[in-house]
Structure formats: C-alpha cells, structure tokens
Image (cartoon, rainbow, N blue to C red):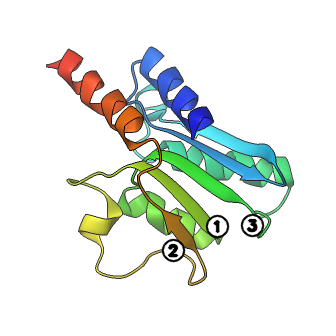
Amino acid sequence: MRLAIKEACAARAEGEIPVGAVVVSGGRVVGRGHNLTETLRDVTAHAEMQAITATAIACDAKYPAEDATLYVTLEPCVMCAGAIGWSQLRRIVIGARDPRRGYSVMCSKNPFHPKAEVVWDVLADDCRSLIVDFFKEKR
C-alpha cells in the first residue's frame, strides 16, 4: 500500500486527484498507476485503469497471474470495479473507503471475480488524508 500511496503523491504533484494503484505478483511490482484524468483529458484515466493496463503490458498477458494483488488507495468507482472484475484480479486491497462514489455504495452486486478477496482499510488514515487534504486546498 505504501507504493500505492507514492503513486497517489505523484498524482497530487501533477495536480490530479491523489489516488494511486499498484499490482504486485510474485513478490514484485508488475503494474502501477495514478490518476491522469486531467493530464490526458480522459475521464477513464483512473489509477486502477492505469495499473491494470501497465500490468497487461508488463506481463504480456490479458489477465494477471492468479497471485496478483491490486493495492489501491481509494475504494474503486463502479467503472474501475468493473475493470478489476474483467481483469480477473483475485485480491484487492483498499486503503480508504469512498462513501460517495465507491463501488460498494453504487453497486448492489459484487463486481469482482467470484473468487476475489477484498481487504479493506489498509493504511486507511494515510489514504484518506491524501484525499481530504487535496480537496481542502482546492476549496
């Protein structure tokens, strides 16, 4: 999660909403990303989408290895949760919950792979403060 937090800090430095994601497989980082929606002028350029794409490129495979874990600093939105489900990631570790736009608020069904494990609130205070501080500065 600390690597995902570093990605979120990189997003913040670029003026992006500070969300970061990292995919780890076999004890090594195989994909990483942070929000690039402003930079790319693309509403789909969320951290999770960037990390999933980077993983596919690095692994030269449509699906990551079964042992792959996605670490993300903020609860994924519905779009990202769907992409995580389609990518068949089996373990998702989430930092802070998103009570407004997170998938758990927006979805009535589990969007992930049926065998996926979801771990909540890992370094939640650190992850939450990134978002809260960012928006305090904006206002």
Residue 40 picture location, percent across and down: 49, 31
Q: Amino acid at mark 3?
A: Tyr
Q: Residues within 10 Å of mark 1 (few under 14, many from 20)?
A: many
Q: Tell me where residue 127 sits by quadrant.
A: top left
Residue at x-position 59% and y-position 72%? 86
**Residue 16 in which image quadrant:** top left
Q: Residue 112, labelled with which disc? A: 2
Horizontal and vertical percent position of residue 94: 47, 53
Q: Toward the viewer: 136 or 84?
A: 136
- Please identify the residue farthest to the left as the structure is shown: 139
Helix, strand or loop at label 1? It is: loop
Q: Are marks 2 and 1 in contact (CB under 8 Å)?
A: yes
Looking at the image, can residue 61 be seen? yes
Disc 2 crowd rating (10 Å Cα; few below 14, some 14-19, many 20+) is many
**Residue depth check, mark 3 versus mark 2: number of the one nearer the observer:** 2
Q: Which residue is label 1 attached to?
A: 89
Give the residue type that dot 1 points to: Leu
- Kindly check if marks 1 and 3 are in contact, taking CB atoms under 8 A apart as contact: no
State the residue in front, 6 or 45: 6
